[in-house]
Image: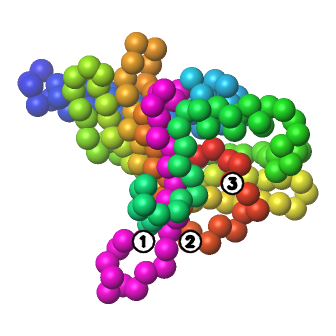
Amino acid sequence: MQADQLAALERLLLHRDIEDVMHAEAELLDARRFDEWLTMLAPDIRYWMPMMRNVHSAHGADEFTHEQADANWMDEGLKTLTQRVRQLATGIHWAEEPVSRTTHMVSNVRLLAVRAGTPREVDTSCRFLIYRNRQQDEADTFIGKRLDTLRQTDTGWKIARREIRLDQNVLLAKNLTTFF
């Protein structure tokens, strides 16, 4: 096999491996197996969701709030994500009692950059659709794009960074208890 064919095959296998990680994560979230989901996160994770703004077309495509400068929907690390999971586990979380039923769909997975070395990191982009239903009449749909950095470790791939970009500038849901 030629070197370029081998490189293409390795990239294809890496792409498939990353997709498997994303699909496994979606299954854990839908099954409310949040403790297991936390094990997929790197200790130094940055979990960030900027807000979208309506901007005039003459001002460019700077629709999202800026990192560490503007207000955001979320800006969390492993500690706060763990606290959210612990709060949900109490059964007295007002926005999740009764619990939400969710379906996470991930598509259009692309590998943006692969950084060799130890540890190896892969920058990805994907599209997501999350459907959430609560009570008899509460239904929310979250659609957007994720920019993730996955880090390869001895125990598998870990999510080291997640930027969540919702395709809406007004949040129509009553709360943001869903993990993306």
Q: Amino acid at mark 3?
A: Leu
Mark 2 secondary-structure assignment: loop
The residue pinned by badge 1 equals: 63
Task: Give the quadrant of the N terminus.
Answer: top left
> Residue at label 2?
169
How many residues crowd mark 1 within 10 Å: few (<14), some (14–19), many (20+)? some
Question: Who comes first in sequence, dot 2 or dot 3?
Answer: 2
Q: In the drawing, what numbered circle is on residue 176?
A: 3
Which residues, given as a range, are shown in magenta? 40-63
- Is residue 115 in sight in this rendering? yes
> What amino acid is labelled 2 in the image?
Asn
Residue for point 33% across, 82% down: 59
Q: Locate residue 142 relative to residue 163 in the image: left or right.
A: right
Give whichever of discs 1 and 3 has the lower sequence position: 1
Residue beneath the point at 32% across and 35% down = 122
Do the residues bearing badges 1 and 2 touch, measured as CB atoms within 8 Å?
A: yes
Crowding at mark 3 (Cα within 10 Å: few <14, some 14-19, many 20+): few
Secondary structure type for disc 3: loop
Could you give the CA–CA distance between mark 2 and mark 3, rounded to whole angstroms? 14 Å
Identify the mark at residue 12; answer none if there is no mark. none
Q: Which residue extends farthest front?
A: 69
Residue at figure coordinates x 70%, y 68% from the top left: 172
Point 43% across, 55% down: residue = 68
| Residue 65 placement: quadrant | bottom left
Task: Please state the horizontal and vertical placement of residue 125, each as a whole percent of the image.
Answer: 39, 48
Secondary structure category for the residue under label 1 = loop
